[in-house]
Image (cartoon, grey):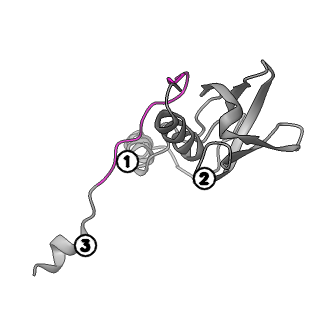
Amino acid sequence: MNPDELEVAPGSEREELQGWIPELATPEEIRTALEKAFHYRGDITITRKDGATVEGYLFDRRPGPTLEASAVRILKASGEKLSVPYSDIARLAFSGRDTASGKSWEAWVNKYMEARAAGETFFIQPESLD
């Protein structure tokens, strides 16, 4: 065994989901899309089968053996938390800005090196989410 090889984990590509409206024709497509929505760092918009829409951050999902027994939990901008059964979802849209997009370590290092090469002082400061 080579310890250097054990220390290296393969990276993963981040999907660009902002603006995506997935097909929700089968239970598997619904489950897959909602799993991606759970890992998305922006708001989503759910259109319920009765036509009502819910927009917010998907902060929890509770998968069950059926779509009726499964639900997602959404945090709206008002602070209200809603639970929506998978079986009640007619449409899903990744409608909000992905706040994690472009925030990789490599992007930060490149920005740091460019500032340093230009003779600038570089401080670590959080960026506004707005």
Residue at 58% in and 34% down: 98
Quadrant where the image shows the C terminus: top right
- Secondary structure mostly seen in magenta is loop
Q: Is residue 124 left or right of residue 120?
A: right
**Rendered image: mark on residue 92:** none
Task: Report the amino acid beneath label 1.
Answer: Glu
Residue at (55, 46) in percent of width and height:
39
Pick whichever of labels 2 and 3 is earlier in the sequence.
3
The residue type indicated by label 2 comes to Pro
Q: Which residue is mark 1?
A: 106
Q: Position of residue 49 (x, y in %)?
A: 73, 23
**Where in the figure is residue 20, as x and y percent of width and height?**
52, 23
Q: Which residue is located at x 24 percent, y 66 percent? A: 8
| 20 falls in the magenta region | yes
Q: In which quadrant will I find the N terminus? A: bottom left
Q: Which residue is mark 2?
A: 63
Q: Which one is closest to the eye, mark 1 or mark 2?
A: 2
The segment highlighted magenta reads 11-23
Mark 3, residue position: 7
In this rendering, the label closer to the viewer, 2 or 3: 2
Q: Nearer the viewer, mark 3 or mark 1?
A: 3
Labels 1 and 2 touching (C-beta < 8 A): no
